[in-house]
Amino acid sequence: MTRQHRILLTAAVVLMTAAPAMAFAAGGGGAEANPYGLGALWSNGDFIARTVLLIMVVMSVGTWYIMISKFLEQARILKDAKIMKSEFWSKPTIQAGADAMPESSPFRYIAQTGITAAEHHEGTMQEAIDLHTWTTMSILRSVELVQTRLQGGLAFLGTVGSTSPFVGLFGTVWGIYHALTAIGIAGNASIDKVAGPVGESLIMTAIGLGTAVPAVLGYNLLVRRNKGAMDEVRNFAADVQSVLLGGYRHLDPNS
């Protein structure tokens, strides 16, 4: 993903996250501003309440950014897997098959790693390791690198899914505490005095749940799709390793 694509994706995620909050704070577009919405929560909240709200906004934006970017990355790998099955194995050499793959394809990276390991084994200290072991180690390392890249960001989703409800609950408890303190000082516990502050505090819980649910669902779905993508990568790596160790040529004999 290029830098320009990352910027566009970030902007889209921010808009997706901020639009519902803005509509809710505006009271659904009515003539009068919502006295119990996010706008009131922000203006009436103290430093801790605003910090909690900002933390949950960052969690939500980060969740949607990671989910969308990972879905696109997985889709590209699965697309490369289809190209690999139709193009790679029909070529006369592994190098020709690797050249037929896209530049950013993990399958090309694994094949190129295997070729390099087979080429530069003799004449160096790596010769102390037999060719079979060295080639296997090199290909396995490339597979692990692809897996690490695919798993990037999933820890953030898991953390958001497990902690954001508690962050929202903390904001709720803090807001209710201040609301009850204000009511006690005023000595008036009528419904109009209680509904506003308590309702604004409960918004924190709603935001926390609204942040956690997409994170949990996205995490589970991404883990499942990662498994399918990594199965394709591992199967390809095993096939390339078998071809290299079987003695089949990996370079063009005319080159």
Image (cartoon, rainbow, N blue to C red):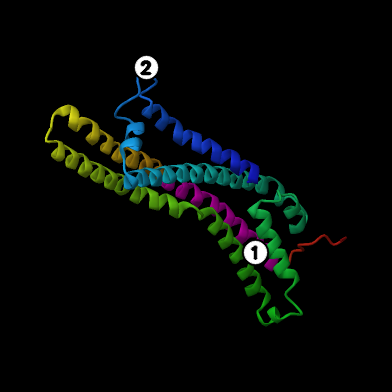
Q: Position of residue 85 (x, y in %)?
A: 65, 48
* Image position of 140 with respect to 35: above or below: below
Label 2: state its secondary structure: loop
Callout 1 environment at 10 Å: few (<14), some (14 to 19), or many (20+)? many
Q: Quadrant of residue 177?
A: top left
Q: Which amino acid does the dot numbered 2 rest on? A: Ala
Using the image, tell me which numbered label, if any, was put on residue 241.
Answer: 1
Badge count: 2
Nearer the observer, 64 or 170: 170
What residue is shown at x 61% (from left), y 62% (from top)? 142
Tell me if residue 235 is in the magenta stretch: yes
Nearer the observer, 89 or 35: 35
Question: From the viewer's perspective, is 78 left or right of 31?
Answer: right
Name the N-terminal-most of marks 1 and 2.
2
- Magenta part of the protein: which range? 219-246
Q: Which amino acid does the dot numbered 1 rest on? A: Gln
Q: Quadrant of residue 244?
A: bottom right
Residue sitting at the far top:
31
Using the image, tell me which numbered label, if any, was put on residue 183.
Answer: none
Q: Position of residue 141 (x, y in %)?
A: 59, 66
Q: Position of residue 116 (x, y in %)?
A: 72, 66
What residue is shown at x 74% (from left), y 64% (from top)? 248
Q: Quadrant of residue 35?
A: top left
Q: Which residue is mark 2?
A: 31
Label 1: state its secondary structure: helix
Question: From the viewer's perspective, is 46 left or right of 3?
Answer: left
Callout 2 environment at 10 Å: few (<14), some (14 to 19), or many (20+)? few
For the question of whether residue 154 can be seen, the reply is: yes
